[in-house]
Amino acid sequence: MTRLQTLTQDPFFVGIDRIFDRMHTMNQSGSNNNNYPPYNLIKSDDNHYIVELALAGFTEDMIDIQVEDGVLSIEGKVEATEVERDFLHKGIGARAFKRSFTLADTVEVRGADLVNGILTVELENVIPEEKKPRKIEIGNAKTFLTED
């Protein structure tokens, strides 16, 4: 059993699986290969997440990142090379792709970087003040019942 499975079955973590499930739900329309490019989903703390994609051979201008209606879409466009090469082995798969992640309502994209062939997209779970836990004092309740 993985750590995530343990957390989602623990009664003290009710609802945490929703964030991971929605991030993992992918829209694969137009893609024949669900494994490309490889990616990681990382939880860095209670409110911060990182999506990493291995994008060897891609430059920043070949990558398009958008968020629309709660869906994070990352698309890589490959330009045709003018020079033909005679490959003895071609193991670096720099091909066009589109990978999408459905985000929870409270998750916002904070930024992205491409360093050494790894695209890192930073996400933050922003919980509104009215949804955050608050302490309820005992003894200051107003009575809503009226006596006749």
Image (tube, rainbow, N blue to C red):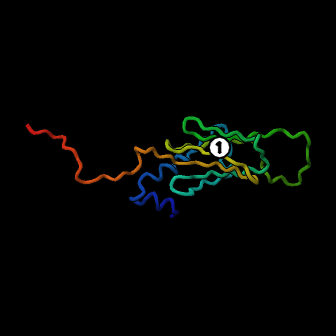
Q: Is residue 56 left or right of residue 50?
A: right
The residue that appears at 30% across and 52% down in the rendered structure is: 136
Q: Nearer the viewer, residue 40 or 49?
A: 49
Q: Quadrant of residue 77?
A: top right
Residue 75 position within the rendered picture, expressed as x and y whole percent measured from the top left = 69, 40
Residue 52 position within the rendered picture, expressed as x and y whole percent measured from the top left = 66, 52
Q: Is residue 138 left or right of residue 27?
A: left
Q: Is residue 37 visible?
A: no
Secondary structure beneath dot 1 equals: strand
Q: Is residue 37 left or right of residue 41?
A: right
Q: Which residue is mark 1?
A: 99
Q: Nearer the viewer, residue 24 or 91?
A: 24
Q: Amino acid at mark 1?
A: Arg
Q: Nearer the viewer, residue 110 or 88?
A: 110
Q: Nearer the viewer, residue 13 or 139?
A: 139
The residue that appears at 72% across and 52% down in the rendered structure is: 118
How many numbered circles are shown?
A: 1
Location of the C terminus (image quadrant): top left
